[in-house]
């Protein structure tokens, strides 16, 4: 049990209005005197826990393709509309207004092949807020990386071109400046899997119906069944209703065999410390085989998995010894700075059947996986970044993203190896740190150390209170301007974001190219009325095919 500073406790007590002005530095927040604890509900009490099935995202297919006859490079074209819609969350309350890609939560699932066709994805904004889409974990060129200021306004579209170069679990989500928290919270997030067929055949891991995405997020509902959004929140947002793939505390029917789970923390501020437990309290091993950026060098068995916002892990769970039983994914209480409520110690349930319909991918999990080309060790630190709250504002080295003149905090040379020291000196906040473009290796962490399963390449690292983490990375493959930031979306929106510029292209444009500028007018959003597929086939895709965006 804790005392907390958060507006949302008032919602459950009927004290708070539907909307409110952001508090000033001198405001006394009324809920600072309200005791909250593990038995509290902020939302209306939700009773059908473990009674609704897990919803799996729908697979999206390309609408057309184009191949450059000279280079052999193929481009697949997809279309996604950002839409308002409603979904029934509480059985006895009105349907909840939400948003999503193609009116789905999570958005459509991409399954593409590493080294296969490039993806051209047209995002059409049909909601009020501006949007910008970041394919998180992809080494995309700056105009296609979801630069926060490169927005798609209502009634506009933008075509993003993605490389699909290496096997990994990616996700796509909103990244619009000052609007990321509310846009992503409302449902603008989806999974994007890049699969390497050679690796998959070699490792023989669970695939198909045994390869399950799990997107976790927490939310608060008001008495009318509508969402209490993070609008106006400047510190943290901790919900009391845990969702997986958009469903509160769902169940999944599984066979008594191995399953592969691709787990993503898509929450606004909450991190998780997960276990998978039988009714008798036995913790099932989670065999981690992949991190944010793909397969690790070796598999790691753990009975506890810490996952922060934007992190992804792939792990194998074997249900074979629990036929006919229920197994629960749980979340530890009193972890980090998370607020605990009545059922935030639960995530979802697995109902284990008694028969196995296929043995494909059900063999031993390999101990050795891939050889990773880690950067050579360095003894010097190239940059030190402090993630702090200063005068009520979230900052990196006392700089925020709105400080356009000073927000470039690093200018590594293309291909250069750097060590970054990430510091959270606060005893009151946690910061998951995401660095765009690159894959990094977690070198060290004070206190608890590097977790055994943080062994592969990553793009996000959890920086808990009073922690200092060192990461090492090659700054490649592209020159240009990229962002790095806290992925607590409240902190990100309130300016805990800065820029690094590979080759210092803003100051020296000749060291980059036309793709180094994230707001190159050629690739900005345009007005949309309808999509002419004939034009896509005859003009749009041939144009991208001649740009040499991702040189072969």
Image: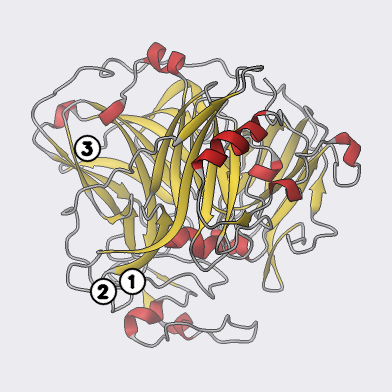
Whether tag 2 and tag 1 are in contact, CB under 8 A, the answer is yes
**Of helix, strand and loop, which one carries label 3?**
loop
Q: Is residue 19 above or below residue 471?
A: below
Q: Position of residue 255 (x, y in %)?
A: 16, 30
- For label 2, the crowd category at 10 Å Cα-Cα, with few meaning under 14, some 14 to 19 and many 20 or more, is some
Q: Position of residue 61 (x, y in %)?
A: 40, 35
Image side of residue 140 versus residue 224, left or right? right
Q: Is residue 420 above or below residue 229?
A: above
Q: Position of residue 194 (x, y in %)?
A: 48, 29
**Of helix, strand and loop, which one carries label 1?**
loop
The residue pinned by badge 1 equals 221
Q: Is residue 413 above or below residue 74?
A: below
Q: Which of the 4 image quadrants contains residue 166?
A: top right
User: Residue drawn at (61%, 43%), measured in percent from left and top?
Assistant: 446
Q: Nearer the viewer, mark 3 or mark 1?
A: 1
User: Residue drawn at (56%, 52%), measured in percent from left and top?
Assistant: 464
**From this viewpoint, is residue 45 visible?**
yes
User: Residue drawn at (80%, 33%), measured in percent from left and top?
Assistant: 380
Q: Position of residue 452 (x, y in %)?
A: 48, 31
Q: Nearer the viewer, mark 2 or mark 3?
A: 2
Nearer to us in this view, 514 or 276: 514
The residue pinned by badge 3 equals 282
Q: Which mark is residue 44?
A: 2
First of labels 2, 3 by sequence position = 2
């Amino acid at each position: 049990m804790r005392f907390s500073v958060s507006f949302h406790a008032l919602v459950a007590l009927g004290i708070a209005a539907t909307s409110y002005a952001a508090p000033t530095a001198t405001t006394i927040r009324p809920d600072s005197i309200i005791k909250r604890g593990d038995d509290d509900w902020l939302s209306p009490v939700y009773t059908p826990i473990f009674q609704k099935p897990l919803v799996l995202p729908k697979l999206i297919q390309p609408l057309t393709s184009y191949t450059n006859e000279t280079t052999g490079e193929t481009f697949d074209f997809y279309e996604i509309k950002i839409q308002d819609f409603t979904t029934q969350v509480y059985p006895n309350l009105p349907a909840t207004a939400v948003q999503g890609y193609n009116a789905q939560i999570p958005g459509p699932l991409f399954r593409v092949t590493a080294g296969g066709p490039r993806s051209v994805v047209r995002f059409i904004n049909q909601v009020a807020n501006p949007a910008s889409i970041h394919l998180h974990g992809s080494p995309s060129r700056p105009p296609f990386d979801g630069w926060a200021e490169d927005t798609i306004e209502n009634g506009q579209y933008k075509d993003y071109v993605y490389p699909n170069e290496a096997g990994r679990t990616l996700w796509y989500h909103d990244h619009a400046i000052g609007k990321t928290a509310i846009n992503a919270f409302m449902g603008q997030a989806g999974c994007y899997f890049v699969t390497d067929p050679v690796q998959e055949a070699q490792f023989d891991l669970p695939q198909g119906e045994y390869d399950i995405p799990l997107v976790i997020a927490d939310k608060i509902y008001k008495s009318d069944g509508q969402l209490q959004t993070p609008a106006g929140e400047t510190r943290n947002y901790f919900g009391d209703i845990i969702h997986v793939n958009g469903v509160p505390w769902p169940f999944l029917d599984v066979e008594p065999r191995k399953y592969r789970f691709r787990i993503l923390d898509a929450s606004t501020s909450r991190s998780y410390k997960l276990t998978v437990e039988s009714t008798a309290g036995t913790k099932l091993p989670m065999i981690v085989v992949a991190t944010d950026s793909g397969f690790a060098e070796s598999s790691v068995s753990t009975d506890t998995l810490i996952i922060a916002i934007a992190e992804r892990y792939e792990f194998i769970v074997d249900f074979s010894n629990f036929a006919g039983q229920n197994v629960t994914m749980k979340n530890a209480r009193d972890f980090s700075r998370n607020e605990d409520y009545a059922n935030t110690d639960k995530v979802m349930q697995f109902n284990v059947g008694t028969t196995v319909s296929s043995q494909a991918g059900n063999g031993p999990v390999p101990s050795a996986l891939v050889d990773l080309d880690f950067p050579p060790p360095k003894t010097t630190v190239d940059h030190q970044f402090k993630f702090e709250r200063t005068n009520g504002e979230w900052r990196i080295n006392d700089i925020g993203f709105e400080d356009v003149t000073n927000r470039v905090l690093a200018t590594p040379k293309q291909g250069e190896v750097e060590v970054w020291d990430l510091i959270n000196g606060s005893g009151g906040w946690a910061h998951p740190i995401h660095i765009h473009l690159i894959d990094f290796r977690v070198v060290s962490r004070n206190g608890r150390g590097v977790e055994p399963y943080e062994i592969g390449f990553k793009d996000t690292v959890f920086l808990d209170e009073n922690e200092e983490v060192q990461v090492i990375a090659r700054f490649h493959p592209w020159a240009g301007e990229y962002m790095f930031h806290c992925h607590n979306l409240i902190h990100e929106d309130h300016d805990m974001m800065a820029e690094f510029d590979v080759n210092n292209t803003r100051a020296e444009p000749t060291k980059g190219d036309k793709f180094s500028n994230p707001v190159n007018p050629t690739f900005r959003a345009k007005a949309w009325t309808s999509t002419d597929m004939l034009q896509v086939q005859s003009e749009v895709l041939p144009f991208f095919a001649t740009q040499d965006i991702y040189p072969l």
